Amino acid sequence: MAAVAAASHVGGRQFLGRMWTKAFSIPCRHHKQKKKWAATRPKISAKRLALQNFDMNYSMQFGSLWPSIRVSLLSEKKYGALFNNFSNIEQITQELECLNAVDFILESQKVVQDLNPAAGHQDSESAVSTGPLAVPAKSQAQPPPSLSTLISPNIKCYTFPKGDISLFPPARPDTIGILGYYLLDAASVLPVLALNVQPGDFILDLCAAPGGKTLALLQTGCCRELAANDVSISRTGRLNRVLHSYIPPNVYDIVRITSGDGRKWGDLEANTYDRVLVDVPCTTDRHSVMEEDDNIFKSMRKGERQMLPMLQLELLVSGVLAAKPGGEVVYSTCSLSQLQNEYVVERAVELLNIQYNIEVRVEDLSIFRRLFQDTFTFFPNCRLGELVVPHLSSNFGPMYFCKLHRLG
Ligand SMILES: C[S@@+](CC[C@H](N)C(=O)[O-])C[C@H]1O[C@@H](n2cnc3c(N)ncnc32)[C@H](O)[C@@H]1O
């Protein structure tokens, strides 16, 4: 069976394939019954099929929260403007602030100060660190040092406040042709923040195209080298074009772009990277209910859809194997599905332990919920990782992210 074959590719253990097949209810071929369709049976659109599928699964997963998430998924999404530190900083800051947008990452500093009010009365020389959120009073322009030990530094992303549905105008090129900001779902910056990139890090972005998160990683100014991979040649072309529009040639020099199957990276470059981002292909829930084009719920893509959790598992395992012992890995999707989110993480932890004797610790990211609650709506009951759910007042996401620390 295909599921078992794919599991063998990960680790050669048939039991995983059986476990997986059971968990995801992939029907065995010999139990399939041929259905007879009337020639006149109306074709159901992929968007409609996606919504039916979500209604069935997510009403169980989210209970009374589902109607609110559903209507938000079907409504216009909000954007954030990822600030380009390589452009004209003063001009772009002024432009974005004139629109009444705020940098939601800088704003989170206020939350830190609320959590630790004593920090507001100390100067930065005398501040005593009393806990993970202790911050010195100074430094309005930079996140406080303790915050920058939790999240990747130097990333700025502007959003409009909750309830404000204003739109950003398209970014314009500056005098040397570099664009000032990149429009994206602001929640997609969260996995990059969670990766907690440190100066001199060697970074792998395993599924990188079209490049929003790669660009955010480069904004940290911390990457010694960044390997950006995506299996799709056309999409790596797009990634290349994005990078050329946003970063100067000397920064481009630290980026290595490849078009390979990320599942092979664990073999090809084992124990290599300080930080790995595994932003996997998924059911892209918002896209699936809104767009017919490139929709994974098209009937001809049924097999691909059913195999997604297996592909996600293989990519995550490969990403962890490519990380150095002690390295950190962030797994992310833009789906609400537990099967593609927590279950994949659980299976990966299990498989790494059993098959490779590698211990992995799943990090607690609940601080993200407190830091960014003014910008995003978080699902409060994730067992592992964090999930931003669409809400009409802050229509970002879905975005799931979970951080794994490779111990050995
Ligand atoms: C969610 S998108 C990545 C978005 C990207 N990280 C960003 O922020 O712009 C998932 C990507 O995974 C790529 N992909 C699918 N299968 C892959 C594989 N086996 N190895 C590497 N990339 C893969 C797809 O081509 C797609 O571009």
Image: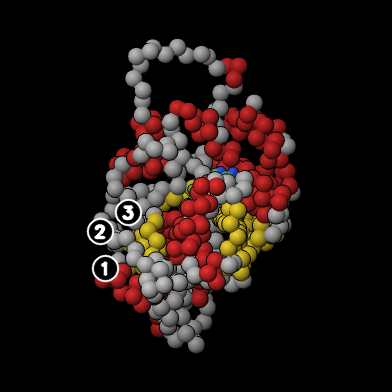
The first of marks 2 and 1 along the sequence is 1
For the residue marked with disc 1, what is the amino acid?
A: Asn
Q: Is 290 situated above or below 35?
A: below
Residue matched to label 2: 166
- Contact? badges 1 and 3 (CB < 8 Å): no
Mark 2 sits near ligand 1, with its Cβ under 8 Å away: no
* 117 and 183: which is toward the camera: 183
Please provide percent x and percent y for residue 43: 36, 23
Quarter the C terminus occupies: bottom right
**What residue sits 68% from the left and 50% below the top?**
266
Mark 3 sits near ligand 1, with its Cβ under 8 Å away: no
Q: Quadrant of residue 106?
A: bottom left
Number of labels in the image equals 3
Rounded to the nearest whole Å, what is the CA distance between mark 3 and mark 2? 8 Å
Residue matched to label 3: 78
Can residue 277 be seen by looking at this rendering?
A: yes
As drawn, is 309 to the left or to the right of 140?
Answer: right
As drawn, is 208 to the left or to the right of 286?
Answer: right
Which element is circle 2 on? loop
Residue matched to label 1: 100
Q: Residues within 10 Å of mark 1 (few under 14, many from 20)?
A: few
- Colour scheme used in the picture? secondary structure
Q: Quadrant of residue 226?
A: bottom right
Numbered mark located on residue 212 in the image: none
